[in-house]
Image: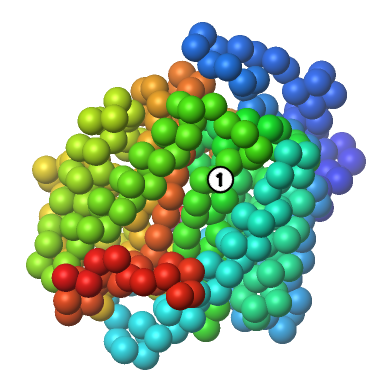
Amino acid sequence: NDPCWCGSGNKYKKCHQARDLLSAMGGGVARVAGVQSKAVQPYLISPRRSVPASIPRPDYALTGKPQGPRSRTLVKSPEQIERMRTACRAARQVLDLCKAAVRPGITTDEIDAIAHQAYIDLGGYPSTLNYHGYPKSLCTSVNEVICHGIPDLRQLENGDIVNLDVTIFLNGMHGDLSETVFVGTIDAESKRLVDVTHECLMRGIATVKPGSAIRDIGRAIQTYAEANHFSVVRAFVGHGIGEQFHMDPQVAHYYDSNTRGECVPGMTFTIEPMINQGTWGHITWDDHWTAVTADGRRSAQFEHTILVTEVGVEILTLPDGVAQPFQH
Ligand code: MF3
Ligand code: CO
Ligand code: CO
């Protein structure tokens, strides 16, 4: 009945006890047919990190619940777009710091510490921290984890792939991006998965221009993924973003003929395809966050935040100095 060591304020037995027992058992060595690496297992999570009171916070930071209705206005003003640019550029800087730290032996919790400090140094708040109760400052999704992996004390191993999904709240706006990176030397099929997933993101973005259909994004992604014998995750979608972390429109990464809506200059949203080696279905762990592939095979993801412009699309989360690829 003691309070949990993680600082949640909940009783230990209702909080981290089950996970601690699992990791005491060695993390398990479950093997799934056709899967080379050990299954990723729930692991120890470090205590919650704090954010200085001087950093402006999103409305959910205290309660975990976003306040008020989802915004109905999808087109942003020039002033809002400038603030989006700042937030997205900062998110990119945080991601690049995290990427540079990836090596066999580092824990995803150490990457969380790097991200956490980087957001604060930029004057921003880690958007994921306490978002619907999420406990950490970025998502780290290893191997068969599709998305929303929670940074923990597991060390990354040579041959792993890990998606780092970074979101900052800065100047009243969220900027969101992710990349899947290699840990040491990886096998050819994992490399192919990661390369195809990045190309899926770019082909989705390439469809975007004034008047283009939102559903064309998913169509382009699904066509390319399936031509390469991979599958597209359906349960998680891209999203409008701005003052709110997740808002309309929803952006499916597969072709959904029922999806209405078209791209209008001034809209900002993410595209973030999750592509699997095997089937597209998922299972959610008892932590209520970690989504893993149903068949244990690997999954990769890339994400950009984009702006629909008068002439096409601007990727807001590109590194400084990289040319915009799609100015129609
Ligand atoms: N960054 C993720 C996205 O791309 C959202 C993570 S929400 C969290 O939409 F709570 F899981 F962190
Ligand atoms: Co993200
Ligand atoms: Co996103």
Where residue 162 sits, quadrant-wise, is top right
Is the residue marked by circle 1 packed among few (<14), some (14-19), or many (20+) residues within 10 Å? many
In the rendered image, the residue lying farthest to the bottom is 79
Q: Is residue 277 above or below residue 56?
A: above
Picture residue at 48% right of the left edge, 75% below the top: 320
Picture residue at 70% right of the left edge, 15% below the top: 29
Report if residue 12 is visible in the image.
yes
Picture residue at 87% right of the left edge, 37% below the top: 1
Image check: 67 left or right of 208?
right
Image check: 159 left or right of 278?
right
Instruction: Tell me where residue 78 appears, x and y as whole percent.
Output: 31, 89
Picture residue at 27% right of the left edge, 47% below the top: 252
Q: Is residue 253 above or below residue 92?
A: above
Residue under numbered circle 1: 181
SS state under label 1: strand
Report if residue 130 is visible in the image.
no
